[in-house]
Image (cartoon, rainbow, N blue to C red):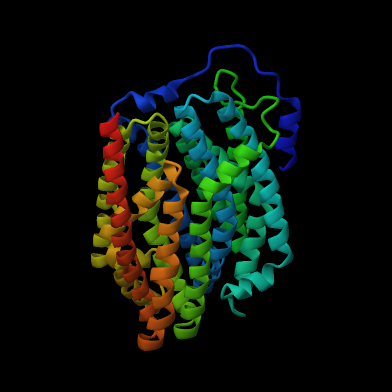
Amino acid sequence: MGFFPLALILFVPLQAKMSYNTSFLELGQAPVGRLLVKYATPAVVAMTASSLYNIIDAVFIGQGVGALAIAGISLTFPVMQLTGAFGAMVGVGAATLLSVKLGERDYDTARRILGNVLVMNVVMGVAIAALMLLFIDPILYFFGAGEETISYARDFMRVILYGNVVTHLYLGLNALLRSASHPKRAMVATIYTVLINVVLAPLFIYGFHWGIKGAAWATVLSQTIVLFWQFKMFSRKDELLHFQRGIYRLRRSIVGQSLAIGMSPFLMNLCACMITVVINWSLAHYGGDMEIASYGIVNRLAFLFLMVVIGLNQGMQPIAGYNYGARLYGRLHEVLTRTITMATCVMTFGFLLGMFVPQLCARAFTTDPELIMRVAHDMRIQLLAFPIIGFQIVTTNFFQCIGMPGKSIFLSLSRQLIFLLPPLLILPRLIGSDGIWWSMPISDTLATFTTAYLFFRQMKKFKRMEAAQ
């Protein structure tokens, strides 16, 4: 798979003189509410579908392989966060830079961003996969695997790493599709991946009896198929951004700015990986493998709502980035407040679901009565702060969208390292495994108040700048 981008670089034709699709100009002209619906709806649908697949995948594994397999796949989560952190640094950073450059009408740089993203993802995807495959067992043991779960985690993670370069390219190109004013194409790519995955996973797990490896192969193959479709989309010469000679040479300014902007999601994912390791260690020590399995289920259900908010963020990103680049601060403020309102409604619904019907959610994953009771108890604690964290997530992403990675990085790190890590280390010693779960709503609440302070300061600056204009 890694040879295809190389062939593409060598044989794409020279750019023809023609008129390009400039639909991205609507980002600074159309009503903000209509734009947000247009851009966020495909992203939300795509993210929801992706999250639902993760849930369905866990259901297949839990019902078809067993409760320990759920624990094993839960242990691979921090490894996937770590590999995803590098992919996000390139993909999200470049997509944000692309939105700003389109707003500034710097189309030459915008074209080169596409080529640079392709090359960076290939290099990084191959290097990270090779390094992790060499040390897969020590990595999994470090992340909390035990003798009963290591085989499940190893079998799943090896296959995922074989397709790591595909994953990086697939996610990176999808981010560029959204920034290039093609949110529906990005949605279609994600939905295709999910549908192919849902068909292949039960076939491989039950039909071919591949067990947990079958779930991993379904993920890799579905992304590979859709990646070819993405290459076809970016080969269309009537688009401003398309594969052509002269855009693949890495430019220091593009690489540097992309990585600087992408440093926020990278550090966010890296810290999340570290925190997940601490959680897995603590759960193994204070609760055992069944508590780890509970964490795997609760996390997937929580991520269903978090992914919707991430979809809203993805819809906001090109609108915010473009209008910031065009210095349209009134429109910038409007898209932010609308996104925060939507995110708060989504997370409040998740809170209500977790409070009133947690057992119903747990029964979808397992028939083990002990695990069902654990999930119900743990979910009620973890989701306590859900009604307020939509604001925190959107605002943190907003600073990244407008090229202010410093604030975004600070908010990400403070939530993980300052507000979450100390309770994770202290509370379990006082109240056992419940202390691990209580650490999460406590940190979310403190992080939200910190975010609110920076948010209102920045809004005052935008209002002064708008008044000056």
Q: Is residue 409 above or below residue 277?
A: above
- The C terminus is located in which quarter? top left
Name the residue: 37% across, 39% down.
316
Q: Is residue 328 above or below residue 449?
A: above
- The N terminus is located in which quarter? top right
Left or right: 339, with 237 as reference point: left
Q: Quadrant of residue 131?
A: bottom right
Can see residue 71? yes
Give whichever of 123, 260 is nearer the camera. Answer: 260
Where is residue 49 shown, x and y percent of the image?
43, 47
Where is residue 169 shown, x and y percent of the image?
61, 42
Left or right: 56, with 206 as reference point: left
Question: What is the count of numbered marks?
Answer: 0
Name the residue: 76% across, 29% down.
10
Where is residue 22 shown, x and y percent of the image?
47, 20
Q: Quadrant of residue 80?
A: bottom right
Where is residue 451 shown, x and y percent of the image?
33, 57
Left or right: 28, with 9 as reference point: left
Question: Which residue occupies the extreme front position in the image?
Answer: 468
Name the residue: 66% across, 29% down.
247
Name the residue: 35% across, 68% down.
443
Can see residue 350? no
